[in-house]
Amino acid sequence: MYWLMICRHRANADDLRERHRDAHRQHVATGGGGLAKVLIGSALTEDDGETPIGNFGVLEAPTREAAQAFAESDPYALNGLVQSIEITALASRFQAHRIDPMTR
């Protein structure tokens, strides 16, 4: 099943984000130790395209609980950067194959 994950970050926490960025990227690359596969994801920003406010991902995970566990075990979440996590199911007709693997 596919899920949209939106993680909102605390304001003015650039130093915290920077300290845990490498561990966050490793978490994403490994799917949190196999909890979920990240099909695509990126930072979320203010309208200026620069000021970070969070991150999102389209996840493939067997259950909402697995997707939630992936988000909660992210080093950003574990170290207090993440203020809120939203997991939303994507329609059963979601066309994951349309995400170009060359862009990842």
Image (tube, helix red, strand yellow):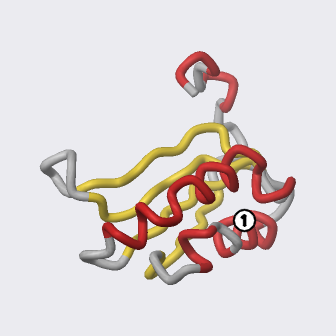
Question: Furthest residue to the left?
Answer: 48
**Where residue 18 appears, x then y in whole percent?**
41, 61
**Where residue 78 appears, x then y in whole percent?**
61, 79
How crowded pointer 1 is (Cα within 10 Å; few <14, some 14-19, many 20+) is rated as many
Looking at the rendered structure, the kind of residue marked 1 is Phe
Q: Residue at x 50, y 83 (%)?
A: 80
Quarter residue 16 falls in: bottom left
Question: Furthest residue to the top?
Answer: 102
Q: Is residue 103 left or right of residue 13?
A: right
**Where residue 70 appears, x then y in whole percent?**
72, 65
Determine which residue is flagged by label 1.
70
Q: Is residue 55 left or right of residue 11?
A: right
**Where residue 58 appears, x then y in whole percent?**
60, 47
Q: Residue at x 58, y 28 (%)?
A: 104
Q: Is residue 10 left or right of residue 83?
A: left
Q: Residue at x 16, y 52 (%)?
A: 47
Quarter residue 61 falls in: bottom right
Q: What secondary structure is marked by label 1?
A: helix
Q: Residue at x 25, y 75 (%)?
A: 12
Q: Is residue 45 left or right of residue 97?
A: left
Quarter residue 8 falls in: bottom left
- Along the viewing direction, whichever of 21 and 69 lies nearer the viewer: 21
